[in-house]
Amino acid sequence: MKRLITLLLIILVISTASAQFNLYLENKITVNTGEITIIQISPNGRFLAFGDQRGNLHIWDIKAGRQIHQIQSDHKSVTALVFDRQHQQLISGGIDGRIRVWDLYTGSEQLLIKDFRSQIYSLSLSPDDRFLAAAGKKDDVYLWEYPLGTLKGKLKGHKKDVLAVAFSIGGDQLLSVGEDRQMVVWDINKLAPVRKTAIEARTMKNSGIEVKSAAFSFDRKFAGIGIQEHILAKGGRSMIFKYNLSFYDWETGSEIETLIGNRQDITFFSITPDKQYAVTDNSTLQKKQLSFWNIQNGVIEQNYPIDGPITALTVSEDGNWLAVGYQDANNKYQSFINIWELSGIEGYERFASGKSLPSTEKRGFGASIKLNTPAEPLIQYGQQRRLAVMSFDSPGLEENVARTATYLLESKLGNSPLVELVERNQIQKVLDELQYQQSGLTADNAVQVGQHLNAEYMLIGSINKLGNLIIITSKLVNVETAQIEGTREVQCSNATIETISEMVSILAPTIAKY
């Protein structure tokens, strides 16, 4: 048990230290109209809209750092917001059960929809802005033609309130999540369910669960669901509660992963556009804080203290902004919104033309491979260099895994016109003479081996596995100078052993130019 705890602590420390993003406070907005109830950022990252408990709607220009409009919406309390894709309109829903469409530039109301007639929890526009969906304190999902506001139909299938809805990327499907612990995919044209999935993400035997919230990845590959899990403690005098975040595959409805350990109910959260993090309110009574969960390995990479109770948050689609609303710790009638500029979070681009690094999706969230170091080859010009590739270390992995990876890398490097590979039997002969092992060589050891092999360069490295994260690190040692000329590293989150070959394919051209 102690060994397990130690390992978890090591993983936590390493993961925290390796966080790839940073936050810079760009603006702090003071709000004197009560609690912030909902925040939304436009798809282009320019506009920030938020609503409060008194029905006020505020629209800001983020980059200009100024408020454009403050509107009394008559919602009583604003509970849902969505921007159109043209950045011309903002749609709001409230506790009054009405939906209003606003012109972003004039602040004027353009359309009022009265059909829902109950508190609205969630709004979603189809990607082509043709349909608007609403969910809330009803067991039906409502669908309108947009921007006409003509009711297209009601989607019937839930047995309790529907907490959240989202259109698919193609716009032909809608996904809804309800308090009845059902996740339903709907055919928009037929107004009929395609698939129902029971939400049964239990981590304790015979526990009860309640669905508290839902959010969706920007590419609509999966849904995240905030769950309260509870069970009667032994003796029957108290309850045990867990506050979990479960992820479900949109296409299949299968459970991908459940993150355990949030300190309070997850009634709202946001998923970053690169699908790397879930941002939650992870506060206690004494300490208010925001947590960035790495959804690939379930580890909190960073915590950020907040100066009061958190009431709303959102991350922008372009990955550039994080906005968090919270109350003044000493005055519940005053609130603030912190707007942070994010760096290191990739944005979502539906029609991206750039070619990204290869990735596979064989299980879970799908493997995600990326370089942690420059892609520029360490050997990229000049005459052919004599290179010896040593077997990589592989702590925590079977020896044949490292051996196979080394052979694959060696084979790739053999295709470079700038490399002359030292034969493996020659390497083994020198190692035997020096009484060294293939793996575990230090840079000094590698220099000694290289001198006996008449090699110009030695390549040493390691393969490390932390949870479902695999990292391959390589170091190019100059035999003549006894210096490490450079390091190249590639990592794969949600990795399997099978993804190592793809990682090697990405790593090889960073060592020697083909």
Image (tube, helix red, strand yellow):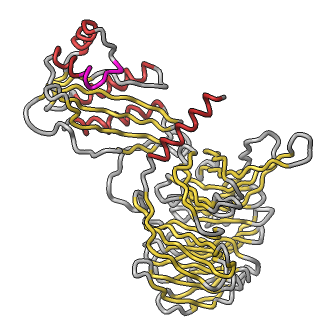
Name the image quarter holding residue 353. Answer: bottom left
Q: Residue 166, located in which quarter of the rendered image?
A: bottom right
Q: Which residue is drawn at 35% across and 19% down?
A: 439
Q: Where is residue 184 in the image (x, y as percent from the top left)?
A: 69, 58
Residue 46 visible, this orientation: yes
Extreme residue toward the left, this view:
383
Determine whether, in the image, residue 193 is placed left or right of residue 291.
right
Residue 424 vertical position relative to residue 53 in the rendered view, above or below: above
Can you say which quadrant of the picture contains the C terminus? top left
The one nearer the camera, 305 or 353, is 305
Q: Where is residue 2 in the image (x, y as percent from the top left)?
A: 64, 29
Foreground pick, 166 / 148? 166
Going 81% across and 45% down the picture, which residue do you hit?
207
Vertical position of residue 406 compared to residue 505: above or below: above
Judged left or right of residue 272, residue 377 is left
What residue lies at 46% left-to-right and 55% top-to-bottom?
A: 274
Q: Give the range drawn in magenta.
A: 439-446
Residue 82 appears at what percent x and percent y? 56, 75
Q: How many marks?
A: 0
Q: Where is residue 431 in the image (x, y as percent from the top left)?
A: 27, 11
Q: Which of 46 and 456 is in front in this view?
A: 456
* Residue at the top extreme, as displayed: 433
- State the quadrant of the N terminus: top right
Looking at the image, residue 492 lies above or below residue 278: above
Residue 353 part of the magenta-drawn span: no
Q: In this view, does 315 lie to the left or right of 225?
A: left
Q: Quadrant of residue 341?
A: bottom left
Residue 151 can be seen in this image: no
Q: Does the magenta stretch include residue 443?
A: yes
Residue at 70 percent across and 75 percent down: it is 120
